[in-house]
Image: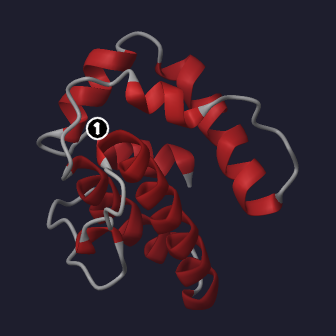
Amino acid sequence: MVHTFYGCIRQHPRLGGIFERRLAGRWEEHLPKMEAFWQSVLMKNGAYKGKPVPAHLKQKELVSTDYGEWLSVFRPVIRELFVPDLADEIVAIAERIAQSLWLATFGTPGANPPAELTSQSSEWSGSCW
């Protein structure tokens, strides 16, 4: 899941560049961290020990719509890799994470995350397969 997703995100017209600038030469270090993160989230095994909110707050080139763009790549990857019920669960978790990160990064008191951070939004039309 992690390797497939990041293979796709690297092709995204905007996010690919952001990730590449941040991780150039360090992908082999980053991917195991993301594997541990998703293991912790999905299997609740405590494998990830990082702090995602501060890491995302450091990303000064992110704009509000980037979390929705991230999901637009994530959703089809997950739906391709998993059976529908499990894919829906994983996507719902990812949407909650994106909403939380968006609120931490761009939210103000009483703000609601953008609609593109829910399953009602459209998918990225880029191809990763």
Above/below status of 128 relative to 54: below
**Label 1 secondary element:** loop
Residue 19, quarter of picture: top left
| Res 129 seen here | no
The colour style of the image is secondary structure
**Residue receiving disc 1:** 10
- Name the residue at the front extreme: 109
Residue under the point 42% across and 60% down: 99
Q: Is residue 92 above or below residue 67?
A: below
Q: Is residue 116 visible?
A: yes
> Which residue in the rendered view is the most extreme toward the bottom?
85
Q: Can you give x and y, in whole percent of width and height, for residue 5 in the image? A: 43, 51
Identify which residue, 94 or 63, lies in the foreground. 63
- Image position, residue 58 (x, y; %): 38, 21
Horizontally, residue 79 falls left or right of residue 10, namely: right
Callout 1: 10 Å neighbours few (<14), some, many (20+)?
A: some
Q: Residue at x 34, y 61 (%)?
A: 71
Q: Farthest residue toward the top?
A: 25
Is 126 on the left or on the right of 36, as rendered? Answer: left
Q: In the image, is 116 to the left or to the right of 47?
A: left
Is 70 left, or right, of 44 in this rendering? left
**Residue at 64% across, 81% down:** 86
Residue 92, percent from left and from top: 53, 75
Identified at 66% across, 50% down, the residue is: 38
- Identify whether 64 is placed above or below 18: below
Amino acid, disc 1: Arg
